[in-house]
RNA sequence: CGGGAUGUAGCUCAGGUGGUAGAGUACACGUCUGGGGGGCGUGUGGUCGCACGUUCGAAUCGUGUCAUCCCGACCA
């Protein structure tokens, strides 16, 4: 067990906070609620970005960039949207500082007040739709499929590294379509892009579903989401995709002429995932020894640690190790050779475990003599001796096995903590135990609200694949046609 | 924004009833070492969160302020 890391069973949330810092992913910054994403954490985010970006391109999207600042007046154009975000917006009121005439420091120059205050974007719908109005005239301009990678600011009261920070990084897609059907299809398509990515690359199983009215994005007609289950039994929304109907098109007067020459408002979607995915990654796979990374996301998939005493052994071991490194690299494996003489092997072992490197290879004089290496896998913490001959091939296989195993373990956990219940008592007990609770609900916002007040459990989603099933609402006993997924959530 | 707790070395913390700051760890150097966070020796490192006040004297007492953490209301 890691020396300085609190065990999950002792205090899960402390474990998370310590792990993020100790694994060198991020730090709290001087600004409340904001984080410094450190190089190792950022390297993982870059891999997430790169993979997702390729998937966006494959589905026909292009990247663009819209401003950080949004005129305040834009915000009031779409009523439910304002209501959703007004309470957490940072506002720019001045554009100049000056030296304090009374002495120390620097103060806001009150004479430099902005005519119209600027909002630091909490999301970009308003500025984007204000821009789209000028870009769209005809059905020939549609669909408009744009994504942007950006930072946004939401003035949260309680923050946690990656899970909820005042400023966070994300991607937001904003698309315009000629028909409602096409826009819905886009929103659903992106939901599946997210689902496939999170499951296949991040090895995190997710429920794909639809949000209830209460949980829907402010300004959307329908919100699709992927929901993941963390090790402590709490659900985490990992991505959302919204069908916005014509709400923003009407608010910003974005119209096009169809083939018949008739003028119509366009149909919209927006979809996003954020650095919160890093939190999901950590809380899905990691253990009491530290971070566990799926090979597809690990900045270093393999690390080679030389074991030696004295210059002679080092020279012998290092030559072999570097040769193996070259072979693994040639096979497309991201492999690091740690030749630092400032740390001892045991220290390095612990460090790479803390940082979640999937495979560790140790090579000492004995191994060189026997033509083998010691291969340790992070997911199971097991070690075995493998021949140097054909190592690149066996490590490739091993990496795939680890990727598969992590996903399988996460699925097994998710399934074992998912319960179907039919009575209120069982429902409350299941929520307390953690995990998804599949239960009947009468479909009304009032009932959902009451359940939330009583149990702190919310409807995470109405799964897309949940079968029709006649039943009675867990709270009211009113008729229901299918089960929905409840859980306590982050 | 309410309720609670805490701010002392990079980190974790000790310093009853006021008298000018200490340990572990980390870091630096030397040495023995090296297959799971090494041993020994020497050394560096702190305007005690900040401001004001009480006092001959404040890490210690008082007031204010800022920050962090935990618990609630809001959220990706």
Image (spheres, coloured by chain):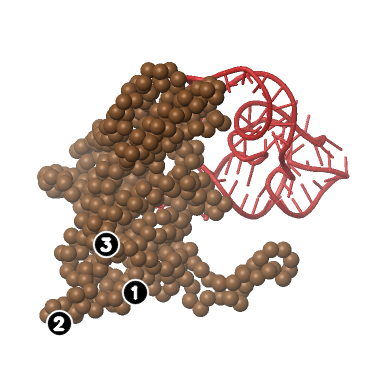
Chain colours: A brown, B red
Q: Of helix, strand and loop, which one carries label 3?
A: loop
Residue A125 percent across, percent down from the top left:
34, 66
Q: Quadrant of residue A262?
A: bottom left
Quickly name the residue at label 1: A130
| CB contact under 8 Å: marks 1 and 2 | no
- Nearer the observer: mark 3 or 1; the answer is 3
Q: Of helix, strand and loop, which one carries label 1?
A: helix
Any part of residue A123 in sight? yes
Any part of residue A476 in sight? no
Quickly name the residue at label 3: A61
Quickly name the residue at label 2: A261
Residues A24 and A54: in front is: A54
Left or right relative to B11: residue A233: left
Q: Quadrant of residue A41?
A: top left
Residue at point 30%, 73% (across, down): A132
Residue A365 percent across, percent down from the top left:
45, 20
Residue B65 percent across, percent down from the top left:
64, 55
Q: Of helix, strand and loop, which one carries label 2?
A: loop
| Mark closer to the chain start, 1 or 2 | 1
Instruction: Please give the chain letter of the residue carrying mark 2.
Output: A
Residues A226 and A41: in front is: A41
- Distance from label 3 to label 1 (Cα)? 20 Å
- Nearer the observer: mark 2 or 3; the answer is 3
- Distance from label 1 to label 2 (Cα)? 23 Å
Residue A294 percent across, percent down from the top left:
33, 38
Residue at point 18%, 49% (across, down): A464
Q: Are marks 2 and 3 on the same chain?
A: yes
Q: Quadrant of the N terminus of chain A?
A: top left
Q: Quadrant of the C terminus of chain A?
A: top left
- Distance from label 2 to label 3 (Cα)? 27 Å
Residue A464, relative to residue A377: is it above or below?
below
Q: Which mark is residue A321?
A: none
């Amino acid at each position: 067990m890691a020396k300085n890391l609190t065990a999950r069973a002792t205090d899960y949330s402390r474990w998370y906070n310590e792990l993020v810092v100790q694994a060198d992913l991020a730090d709290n910054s001087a600004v409340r609620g904001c984080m410094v994403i450190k190089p190792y954490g950022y390297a993982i985010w870059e891999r997430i970005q790169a993979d997702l970006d390729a998937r966006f391109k494959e589905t026909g999207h292009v990247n663009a960039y819209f401003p950080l600042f949004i005129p305040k007046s834009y915000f009031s154009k779409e009523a439910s949207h304002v209501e959703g975000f007004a309470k957490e917006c940072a506002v720019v009121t001045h554009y100049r500082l000056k030296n304090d005439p009374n002495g120390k420091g620097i103060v806001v120059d009150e004479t430099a007040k902005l005519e119209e205050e600027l909002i630091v974007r909490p999301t970009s719908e308003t500025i984007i739709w204000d821009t789209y109005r000028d870009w769209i005239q005809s059905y020939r301009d549609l669909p408009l499929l744009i994504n942007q990678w950006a930072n946004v600011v939401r003035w949260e009261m309680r923050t946690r590294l990656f899970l909820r920070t005042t400023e966070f990084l994300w991607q937001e897609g904003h698309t315009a379509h000629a028909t409602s059907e096409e826009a819905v299809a886009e929103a659903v398509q992106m939901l599946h892009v997210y689902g496939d990515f999170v499951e296949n690359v991040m090895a995190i199983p997710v429920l794909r579903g639809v949000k209830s009215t209460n949980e829907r994005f402010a300004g959307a007609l329908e919100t699709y989401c992927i929901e993941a289950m963390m090790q402590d039994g709490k659900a985490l929304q990992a991505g959302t995709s919204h069908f916005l109907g014509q709400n923003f098109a009407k608010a910003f007067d974005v119209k096009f002429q169809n083939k018949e020459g008739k003028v119509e408002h366009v149909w919209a979607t927006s979809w996003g995932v954020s650095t919160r995915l890093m939190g999901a990654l950590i809380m899905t796979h990691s253990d009491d020894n530290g971070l566990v990374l799926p090979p597809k996301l690990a900045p270093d998939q393999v690390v080679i640690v030389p074991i030696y005493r004295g210059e002679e052994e080092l020279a012998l071991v290092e030559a072999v190790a570097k040769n193996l490194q070259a072979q693994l690299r040639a096979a497309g494996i991201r492999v690091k050779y740690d030749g630092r003489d400032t740390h001892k092997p045991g220290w390095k072992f612990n460090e790479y475990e803390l940082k979640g490197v999937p495979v560790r290879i140790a090579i000492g004089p004995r191994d060189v003599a026997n033509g083998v290496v010691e291969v340790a896998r992070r997911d199971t913490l097991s070690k075995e001796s493998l021949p140097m001959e054909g190592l690149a091939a066996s490590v490739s296989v091993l990496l795939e096995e680890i990727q598969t195993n992590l996903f399988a373990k996460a699925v097994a956990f998710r399934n074992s903590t998912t319960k179907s219940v039919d009575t209120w008592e069982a429902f409350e007990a299941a929520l307390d135990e953690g995990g998804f609770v599949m239960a009947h609900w009468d479909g009304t916002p009032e009932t959902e609200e009451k359940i939330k007040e009583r149990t702190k459990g919310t409807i995470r989603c109405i799964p897309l694949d949940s079968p029709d099933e006649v039943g009675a609402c867990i709270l009211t006993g009113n008729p229901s046609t299918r089960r929905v997924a409840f859980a306590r959530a982050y």
